[in-house]
Amino acid sequence: MARIASQLYLDPETLRSWVRRFEDGQTAVPGVETVSDIDRVRQLEKENSEPESAQGDAQPF
């Protein structure tokens, strides 16, 4: 972890605390977003990026 932290120009303890927060399902502000929230946003972004023809009978403008 110390090697990675130095490559990112971070203090090793800072990186360690970020990893612990991620493993606990927390982001920068504890309780605001969980890993499942982030997964849901990614799923919705993927659905929105699919071509319209794959989404049904949508007609182009």
Image: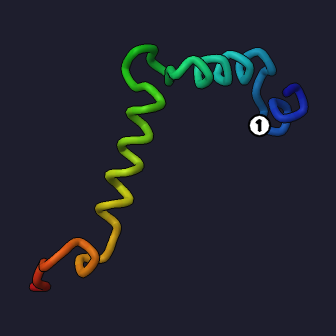
> Could you say where residue 21 lies in the image, as x and y percent from the top left?
59, 18
Task: Depth check: give the residue in front, 11 or 22.
Answer: 22
> Could you say where residue 34 lies in the image, as x and y percent from the top left?
43, 25
The C terminus lies in quadrant: bottom left
The N terminus lies in quadrant: top right
Residue 44 lies left or right of residue 20; in this view the side is: left
Identity of the residue drawn at 85% across and 32% down: 6
In terms of image quadrants, where is residue 3?
Answer: top right
Residue 45 lies left or right of residue 18; in this view the side is: left
- Above or below residue 20? Residue 37 is below
User: Looking at the image, what colour scheme do you see?
Assistant: rainbow
Give the SS element for disc 1: loop
Task: Depth check: give the residue in front, 3 or 20.
Answer: 20
Residue 24 lies left or right of residue 38; in this view the side is: right
In terms of image quadrants, where is residue 52?
Answer: bottom left
Q: Residues within 10 Å of mark 1 (few under 14, many from 20)?
A: few
> Could you say where residue 5 lies in the image, as x and y percent from the top left?
81, 30
In terms of image quadrants, where is residue 33?
Answer: top left
- Above or below residue 37? Residue 44 is below
Identity of the residue drawn at 59% across and 25% down: 22
Total labels: the figure holds 1
Judged from this view, the residue extending furthest toward the right is: 3
Identity of the residue drawn at 43% across and 32% down: 36
Identity of the residue drawn at 32% across and 60% down: 47
Residue located beneath label 1 in the image? 8
**Amino acid at the residue labelled 1:** Leu
